[in-house]
Amino acid sequence: MMKKSTVAISVAFTGLLAVIGFTAMAQQEMQYFRYNDKRGLNVFETPKNDTTPFTKMKVKIGGNFEETFQALTDKNTAIAVTQPGFNGNVNSLTKLTDGFDLAMANLNIDAQLSDGIRLNLTVYLASRHHEDAWVKGGYVQFDKLGFLHSKWVDNIMKSVTIKVGQFDVDYGDEHFRRTDGGNTIYNPFVENYIMDEFATEIGGEIYYHHKSGFFAMAGLTNGELNPTVVAATKIDSSTGQVNKYEPAVHGKIGYDKQLNKNTRMRLTGSFYGVESAASNTLFGGDRTGSHYYYVMENPNVASGTTISNEVDYSAFSGRYNPGFSEEVNTFMVNLFLKYRGLEFFGTFENAQGRTITEKTTRQATQYAADVVYRFPAHKENFWIGARYNSVTAEMQANTNDITINRAVGSAGWFVTRNIILKAEYVNQVYLNYAVTNILNGGQFSGTMVEASIGF
C-alpha cells in the first residue's frame, strides 16, 4: 500500500496538470480528425463525417504529457548464471523502490492543407526508450481529391479515405486504445498489451466506408521501421538465398455501428504479412518504452544487452516480443461493445514468424479482455475497469511453450476533457521459462498512479 505522502504528492501533481490544462488556448478544428482529448475515446479509424467546413489552411499544435508514480515489486526463481562481460549473477533482479518514473511527452502537429486533405506529424519529445526528441512519423490523409476537378472522383471519395506516409500500421484495433509515449488519454490502463503490436512503416492504406457500418481497408508498406537502401548480404536459413526486402501487406474488414441510442457494436478482423524483411518490428516497434519500469530486469543487462534473443531487458519491461524479424504472418479479431457506460473490448491474436537464422516458424497466441464502466450517465467522467491478458508462445531454447498472464484493475477520473488521473493494481506471472532464464518463476505486482494531459 502506498504511503500517505505518496498520495499527497500524486494529488499535488495532478493539481499542477489541471492548472496547465485550464490555461491551454483553443485550437483550430480539423476535418476527419481524432481528438487528442476525451472526445477521442473509442474512436478507431478517423470518422468519415463531413461536419467541419474548410475555409482556409489551418494548423493545430497539440501535445501530450504524462507522469507516473510506480510502487511495484518483483521476484523470480531462476538459478544463478554468470555471463562473460557481466559482473555477478545475471539472473538476479534489479532492486526496486517506490518513486516517480521518467516523464514522457509528445508534440502533435496537424495541418488542414486543403479541403479534405490533412497532414499529421508527431514527435516524441521525451520517452523512456529515447530521452531525446524523436520523430514518430508523418502522413497525409486524403478524404477528398478536389484538385482533380472530377465529380466522379468526388462521389467515390465520399466513401473512401487514403493515407500515405510513415504511420502507425492499422493492424488490429488495440493500437487505437494503447498508450503512446506521453499520450495515455485513450487507454483506461497504464500499460499496453503484453505482446504490443505497434510499428510505424512507410506505405499507404485505402479505406472504404459503407453507410451500413461495414468497412474495409487494404494496405502496403515497406515492412520496416528503419528503412534501408543497402543491399542485403545475409543468407536466409530457410531459403538458402540472400535475404530479400519484400513489401508487407495488411488489411482489415469490419462492422462498426451505433445500433441504437444506448448500444454500439464493432467487430473487426485484420491481418499483416511479410515473407522477408531486413528487420521487421511489428511486435517491437514502440520507440517510447514500457510504462512499467525495471521489473524483471537485471542491473547488469538493463542497458540493452540481452542474454537471449527473446527478451529485451531494457526499455520494454513486462512485454513480450516474439522476435519475428524476418517473417511474420499474423491475424487478429477484435470485438468492441458499449451499452450506455459499460464497455467490453476483446482480442484474439495468432502470429507465426521467425528470425533469419531459423528455418521454421514459431507461433505466439494472445488473448485479452477489457471491461470498463464509465459513470455518471451522459458525462462518464469516472471509470473503473479490469483487464485480463495472456500470451502463450514457442520460444527458442525453451523446451515448453512459455505463458505470461496479466491481471489489472483500474480506476480513473477525467478532471477536465484534457486531464486524467488513473490508478491501477497489476499482477503479472511468467510460466514455463527455463530455470536458467531470468523470467523463470517470475512475478511482479503493485500499484501505479498516472496523471496525463492531452490537447
Image (cartoon, rainbow, N blue to C red):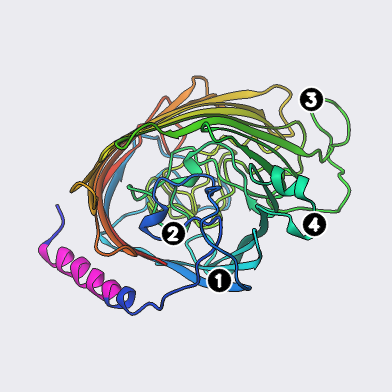
Tag 1: amino acid = Asp
Residue 149's tag is 4
Q: In the image shown, does 196 or 374 lie closer to the viewer?
A: 374
Q: Nearer the viewer, mark 1 or mark 3?
A: 1
Q: CA distance from mark 1 to mark 3?
A: 39 Å
Q: CA distance from mark 1 to mark 4?
A: 44 Å
Which residue is depicted at the point 29% across and 60% down? 420
> Which SS class for mark 1?
loop
Q: CA distance from mark 2 to mark 1?
A: 17 Å
Residue 132's tag is 1
Tag 4: amino acid = His
Q: Is residue 69 visible?
A: no
Task: Identify the residue at the far front of this view.
Answer: 151
Rendered location of residue 17, percent (x, y) = 30, 72
Is 160 situated above or below 164?
above
Looking at the magenta stretch, what is its main secondary structure? helix
Q: CA distance from mark 3 to mark 4?
A: 50 Å
> Which SS class for mark 4?
loop
| Horizontal arrangement in the rendering, residue 280 relative to residue 439 (left or right) | right
